[in-house]
Image (cartoon, rainbow, N blue to C red):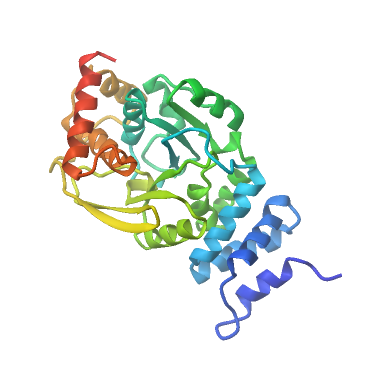
Amino acid sequence: MVDPYADYIRILGRGPTKSRHLTQTEAQAAFAGVLSGEMSDMQVGALLLLLRYRSESPAELAGIVTAMRRHMGAESACEFENLIDWPSTSSGKSRRLPWFLLSAKLLSENGHKIFMHGFNSHLDNGLLTEDCLEAVGEKPAASLTKARRKLESENFVYLPLRNFSPKLQELLEIRSVLGVRSIVNTAVKLINPLAAKLTFLGIFHPAYITLNIDAAALIEQPSLGVIKGGGGEAERNANKAIKLYQIKDGQQTVSKWPAMTKESPDYPVTVDYLSEIWRGSVQNDFASKMIIGTAAQALYLTGHATTVEQAERQAADYWQDHLSHGL
């Protein structure tokens, strides 16, 4: 009997002269086999490593994202106007405190709906996003259905990957066996479970910025913002100049954001410290700049601010108002 998935492995692994990338349709079909469990463990490992070795193409990434969306029953149309899809999938040594979490909560206090979701791994120095939710008075949602219901009456929700797609989390954890990250680490950032019109991504490796933009265009993501963020989070580094790459109405643009401070102070990497910054009981100019700077980029992506300067002023006003109310 012919194995239905052997052809995809063969296409990728026939050697330097005969191998090629998978088409978007082939990648979707292959990954459907991964997610259904029909593909053997040996084939899954071979597929992920070959895709990694060849450097994933936009079509392959788009096909895999589509397979993921269908497997998890993602929404086909968003019921929430102006929802921001905000994946949190940090890993590595550069991640410390998730200042972006405070940025997202700040935006939610000012009427912007935020759907944050993800899974953090291999954090050597930082704290998991999920473990920091208590600092801003939040708890993780138990399911996609409960996350959706919460957004009907509130403006922020965080949903751990394991609570809406344990299979994808299992695939991410294969990293400890393969020794390298796989295309799954990239694809989970684009799954956009509630079909929000806007997705805000952080990418650690610059080469993957173009890959994500091109794949997002193939899956017809209406609006996308991508920055080079520490640990792969959508978090603006306040002490560096940074570019914000954007897709909106089918057009690709790039905006330049200058450094906001030269400071890069040391600070306690604890949930308590994050909570103190959020409540205003501790002042830290660097932390404020990180929070304001990231919120400003999200505002710019939504169209509520049309210039970098306007976005930064509006975000700074949000933060000052938050602190003045002693939240």
Relative to 213, is 83 above or below?
above
Relative to 114, is 67 above or below?
below
Q: Is residue 288 visible?
A: no
Q: Is residue 118 left or right of residue 315?
A: right
**How many callouts does the rendering have?**
0
Residue 162 on image: x %, y %: 59, 37
Q: Residue at x 31, y 34 (%)?
A: 99
Quadrant where the N terminus sits is bottom right
Residue 285 on image: x %, y %: 16, 31
Q: Residue at x 48, y 32 (%)?
A: 80
Quadrant where the C terminus sits is top left
Q: Residue furthest left?
A: 262
Q: Residue at x 36, y 40 (%)?
A: 125
Q: Quadrant of residue 237?
A: top left
Q: Is residue 239 left or right of residue 78?
A: left
In front of the other: 108 or 235 = 108
Residue 163 on image: x %, y %: 60, 33
Q: Residue furthest top?
A: 326
Residue 86 on image: x %, y %: 42, 40
Q: Is residue 68 left or right of residue 205?
A: right
Q: Residue furthest bottom?
A: 17
Q: Is residue 99 visible?
A: yes
Q: Quadrant of residue 141?
A: top right
In front of the other: 200 or 82 = 82
